[in-house]
Image: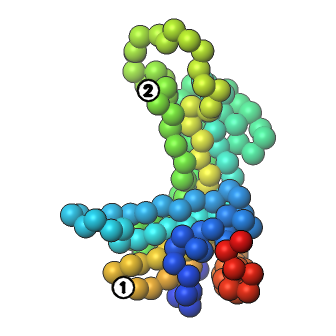
Amino acid sequence: MIYKKLKITMNPYQLYSAINREYPESFLLESLEGQERLARFSFIGFEPKETVSAKGSVISANGQEEDSKNPIRSLAAHVPKMKLEKEGFVGGAVGYFSYDYARQLEKLPEKKKEGSGFPDFEFGIFEDCVVYDHRDRSVHYLSHADDRSDEILGLQKEEQFFGPF
């Protein structure tokens, strides 16, 4: 795993905005600890290695579909198993479960109208992440694949040159 400190002068929201323009499949995740009102960490992930979604018993991963009796197990099979010494969020699956997915897990009354058309769940498998530690006032880049930290630093330079618009 690559883990290195970055010299970033942008706040997490500015950097996320620049990353999202370059990599539309991205996320900004804020992490609270204890009674604090502000996030201890901000995590920015971009360009997932793989996207996994499910609708009913059909799992879709990067355009390939398969039938699954246990969609959550199928999702777990797509998440790399790694033994890491670093604690906290270090990449992996980031996404959502829909409200209606509970019907797959529990016996609930049937809905009267048709579903929303959204997947029951959708997750990106992220190998890259920028980690802001607001308490320590540090920014780190981590990756389980190629080192793309220069791309992130380049986005910061572009943002300073062109501005937010």
For the N terminus, give its image quadrant: bottom right
Against 58, residue 52 (above or below) is: below
Q: Which mark is residue 38?
A: none
Question: Which of disc 1 and disc 2 is earlier in sequence?
Answer: 2
Please report the residue visible at 40 percent of the width from the left and 85 percent of the height from the top: 137
Against 134, residue 27 (above or below) is: above
Please report the residue visible at 60 percent of the width from the left and 41 percent of the height from the top: 122
The secondary element bearing badge 1 is classed as: loop
Against 111, residue 67 (above or below) is: below
On the image, the x and y values in percent for residue 68 come to: 62, 28
Residue 157 makes an appearance in the image: yes
Q: Please, what is the three-letter code of the amino acid marked with disc 2?
A: Ala
For residue 70, which quarter of the picture? top right
Q: Residues within 10 Å of mark 2 (few under 14, many from 20)?
A: few
Which residue occupies the foreground of this view, 163 or 80? 163
On the image, the x and y values in percent for residue 158 come to: 74, 83
Does 53 sit left or right of 106 as displayed? right
The secondary element bearing badge 2 is classed as: helix
Q: Please, what is the three-letter code of the amino acid marked with disc 1?
A: Asp
Against 81, residue 14 (above or below) is: below
Which residue occupies the foreground of this view, 164 or 142? 164
Residue 142 makes an appearance in the image: no
Residue where numbered disc 2 is placed: 102
Residue where numbered disc 1 is placed: 136
